[in-house]
Amino acid sequence: MKEGTVEKELKYLYALQQVDTQLQEVQDLKGDLPSIVEELQGRVNELKSKLKGLHDSLKQAKIDRDEADVGILDCGEKIDKYKGQQLHVKSNKQYDALTREIEAAEAKSLKLEKEMGLLEGKMQLFKSDIETIMPQLEELNAELEGKQKELREVNKEHEKEELKLQHEREKLVVRVEREDLERYERIRKAKGGKAVVPVKRGACGGCFNRVPPQKILEIRQNLKLYQCEHCGRILVSDHIVEMSLSLT
Ligand SMILES: [Zn+2]
C-alpha cells in the first residue's frame, strides 16, 4: 500500500466501527422484542396449523358419519320393503330368501350404527380439542399483536437514526479494501462488536493488555494494519481516532 493509504484505511475502519457500535446500540434498545415477536409468531402458526388439521378431521368425520347415517336409512327402507314383500310371497322358499335379505340388511345397519357411534365419538374429541385450542390461539394472538405493536413503535422511533447510520455505513464500506473489511467483520463477530480499538495509555482499548512501546510507535506511523497480540483487534492511534471523528 502507498504511504497515506493505510492511514485512510484505518480512518475509515475506525469510522465504520463507530457507526456499527451505534447501530448495535439501537439494536440493544429494541432488546429482545424482535426475537420475542418471532417466537410468538412461530407458536401462533403452529397452533393455527393444528387447528386447521382438527377442522379438516372434523369435516371428514362428519362426512363419514352422514354417509353411515344415509346407509342406515337405506337399510331401514330395504328391510321395510322386504317385510312388505314377505306378506305377498307364494312359497316358503321365497319367504326364507327375503328373511335372509332382511337379516343381511339388519347386520349392515348394526355395523353402520357402530361406525356412526365411533365417528360421533371422534367428532366430540375433535370439537373439544378445537374448543381448547381456540382460546389459547386467541390469547397468543393478542400477545403477538401487542408485541408487534411495541416493536413497530420502537422501530419507528429509531427508523431515521438507523437509516442515517446504515447510509453512513454503506458509504464507508465501499471505501475500505475488501480484504480489510472481511478481517474487520471477522474480528467484530468474534469479539462481540469491537474490531477496531484505540491504544489507550499504552494498552489495547479492547482487552486492556499492554502494547509494547515499539509497537505503539509503529502504530502511530500508520504504515500497516496492526492487530493486538492478545485479542487480535485492529489497533489505531489517537490521531486516527481524531481524524475519524471529523469524518462522520
Ligand atoms: Zn487486545
Image: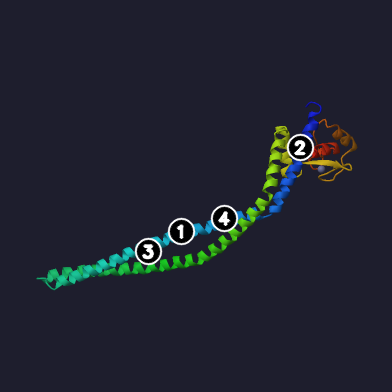
Label 4 belongs to which residue? 42
The residue under label 1 is which amino acid type? Answer: Gly
Foreground: disc 2 or disc 1: 2
Question: Could you say which disc has been placed on residue 53 in the image?
Answer: 1
Q: CA distance from mark 4 to mark 1?
A: 17 Å
Q: Nearer the viewer, residue 214 or 51?
A: 51
Lower sequence index among marks 4 and 3: 4
Lower sequence index among marks 3 and 1: 1
Label 3 belongs to which residue? 62
Number of numbered discs visible in the structure rendering: 4
Tell me if mark 3 has few (under 14), some (14-19) or many (20+) residues whose alpha carbon lies within 10 angstroms of its own. Answer: some
Q: CA distance from mark 2 to mark 1?
A: 54 Å
Question: Could you say which disc has been placed on residue 13 in the image?
Answer: 2
Lower sequence index among marks 4 and 2: 2
Q: CA distance from mark 3 to mark 1?
A: 14 Å
The residue under label 4 is which amino acid type? Answer: Gly
